[in-house]
């Protein structure tokens, strides 16, 4: 629900479109995360998966702060 609210707040005039984008990008994120995790597991072993998760978490935080910075500057 947080993701839906976050995405819809970015597109006040197109809430339905934003909701469908959120669903599509959520599915894309699951697919890319699975593929990336599988690639790292196959090359480096299962012990690397916490670091991959931390990397995705840091990337998500960077994107959140970037959007907040863009919202403030406009």
Image: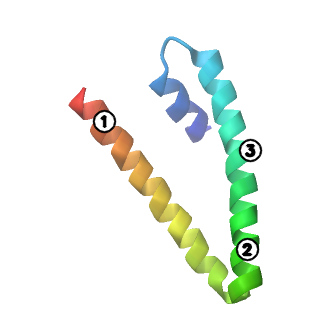
Q: Badge 1 local density, few (<14 within 10 Å), some, or many (20+)?
A: few
Mark 3 — residue?
A: 27
Query: Residue 39 bears which disc, if any?
Result: 2
**CB-based contact (under 8 Å), mark 2 and mark 3:** no
Is residue 71 rendered to the left or right of residue 31?
left
Rendered residue at 55%/63% (across/down): 56
The answer for how far apart the CA atoms under marks 2 and 3 are is 18 Å
Q: Do residues under tags 3 and 1 come within 8 Å of each other at their CB atoms?
A: no
- Residue 64 horizontal/vertical position (percent): 41, 47
**Considering only vertical position in the picture, is 67 above or below 35?**
above
- Taking 69 as reference, is 39 left or right? right
Q: As drawn, is 70 to the left or to the right of 16?
A: left
| Residue at the (49%, 21%) spot, across then down | 11
Quarter holding residue 48: bottom right
> Pointer 3: residues within 10 angstroms few (<14), some, or many (20+)?
few
Q: Nearer the viewer, mark 2 or mark 3?
A: 2
Identify the image's colour scheme: rainbow, by chain, secondary structure or one colour: rainbow
Q: Which mark is residue 70?
A: 1
Badge 2: how crowded within 10 Å, few (<14), some, or many (20+)?
few
Q: Residue at x 75, y 63 (%)?
A: 34
* Identity of the residue furthest to the left in this view: 73
In the figure, 17 relative to 60: above or below? Answer: above
Give the CA separation, mark 2 to mark 1.
33 Å
Whether residue 53 is situated above or below residue 62 in the rendered picture: below
Foreground disc of the pair 2, 1: 2
Placement of the C terminus among the 4 image quadrants:
top left
Image quarter of residue 7: top right
Residue 9 location (% of width, % of height): 47, 25
**Quadrant assignment, res 41:** bottom right
């Amino acid at each position: 629900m947080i993701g839906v609210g976050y995405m819809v707040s970015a597109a006040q005039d197109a809430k339905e479109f934003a909701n469908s984008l959120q669903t599509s990008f959520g599915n894309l994120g699951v697919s890319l995360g699975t593929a990336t995790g599988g690639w790292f597991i196959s090359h480096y072993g299962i012990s690397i998966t916490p670091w991959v998760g931390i990397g995705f978490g840091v990337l998500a935080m960077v994107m959140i702060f970037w959007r907040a910075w863009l919202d403030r500057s406009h």
